[in-house]
Amino acid sequence: MVAVDVTWRSRADVAWPWLALVVRLVLGGVWLAAGAAKIGDPEGSVRAVRAYQLVPDSLERAVGYSLPLLEICLGILLIIGLAQRLVAIATAVLLAVFIVGIASAWARGLQIECGCFGGGGASGGDPTAGYRWDILRDVGLLILAGLLAWRPTSRFSVDGLLYPDRRTREVP
Amino acid sequence: MSNRKKRDDDPRTARATQMRRERERADTRRTRLTVGAIVAAIVVIIVAAGAAIFASERGGGGETPHDLTKDFGIVYSAQTIGSDQAIKGIKPVKVVFYEDFICPACRAWEQQVSSYVKEHVNLGVISVEYRPIAFLDNASTTNYSSRAANAAFCVFNSKGAAAFHTFHDILYANQPSEGSAGLDDSTLNQMAEQAGADNVSSCIDNQDFAGTVTDATDAASQNNIVETPTVFVAGKELQGPDKNTAPGLQDLANAVLAAGAGPVPGTSPSVGQGR
């Protein structure tokens, strides 16, 4: 029994860094796509933030301008695999904020598009289905980010170059 | 593996190994914290600097067309177009249209209500304040929304509300599809000439009212306008028959009736005396 257990664990140990690589690329790709779609139209990003009616007027502009830049930074860091745990935690926090925002727009009956990948503002017709998918997608991504934060050891990462023997140790 | 095990059998070696490992672990932890702090600092600097650049690049301000309302609207009314059919002694119901010239729903709306609007404006039953905005610059490759709105302000500034309205109709009749390059400036200028504004070519080319367009769009967004068209009748947002259906001509006509073009205080309405 013990032998089986050990085999299973060691297999997971071998497989995880590869899975973590996939998780990094998926999350990084999503951030890059989301940021790139917004960066060309910062005023549109401000309007998308404003449409949620959650951020105080004085901060709407700052948040709207910062968000695409932050998303692109997180995307690049995830793809190169630098400071993985920190970036994974930041990713999870930002996703949680988005989920709360969308859920609150849904609960208040606002008819807006999430603005997740640019655009934003009003949605034509019934937005409920849109909200549901946006939230499901973000929850899925949040779970991935949580896994990466829990075990930020992955293949082909800058972290792996900086701390070459991490794989044999418990991550602090 | 077996090598290490052999060494670990010796208590002194094992202890030394353990101490070395602990030291290494502490080193790694320190390195990771340092790297994390540096990365976080760089990200904060990039985000803050980028946001500051966006803020500084933001247009707005500049010259404004004269006779624009404080909400960056153009009033199309019996008075501003000098209608001779206006019914004397009634106060027009105030209607507001937020429109984006590349928005297909705005075009559909205009097609429905255009003749009603013209007739009732001429009679002085309603006045329409057009608030051209540019929500959809991403829907063309050339910021057509902003350029078209700027051109509309140019025409209004130069030739007034009637020319603006003609130009506005021409814009919708020639609306480019979303995702296209939009119409170029010389086409916009030809259309302006068609509407009677033959002196706005430099205003269109240089986007003299680009700042006004930015401010108008911003003001709309701050008024919680999130889509175009958005219509207000006597201060109330016009709703469709249900929440999934956009309002149409019937809804507009009903809302205008409900708001009731009333007599100007102290006078009695008299049909036809305006002629």
Image (spheres, coloured by chain):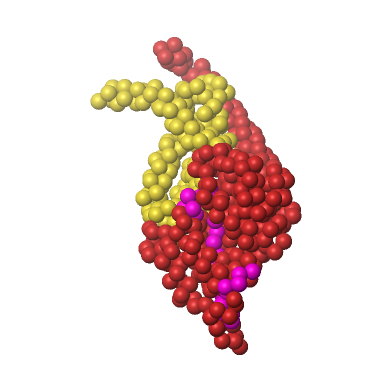
Chain colours: A yellow, B red
Taking the image as shown, residue A3 lies to the left or right of residue B41, namely left
Q: Nearer the viewer, residue A168 or B124?
A: B124
Taking the image as shown, residue B140 lies to the left or right of residue B247, namely right
Which quadrant would residue B268 be assigned to in this image?
A: bottom right
Q: How many labels does the image show?
A: 0
**Which residue occupies 40% across, 42% down?**
A137
- Magenta residues span B82-107
- Residue A22 location (% of width, % of height): 43, 28
**Vertically, is B51 above or below B236?**
above
Q: Can residue B235 be seen in this view?
A: no
**Vertically, is A119 above or below B97?**
above
Q: Which of A108 and A170 is in front in this view?
A: A108
Q: Nearer the viewer, residue B237 or B187?
A: B187
Question: Is A144 contained in the magenta span?
Answer: no
Quarter of the image with the N terminus of chain B in it: top left
**Vertically, is A35 above or below B167?**
above
- Residue A29 location (% of width, % of height): 49, 32
**Which residue occupies 38% across, 46% down?**
A133
Quarter of the image with the C terminus of chain B in it: bottom right
Question: Is B96 contained in the magenta span?
Answer: yes
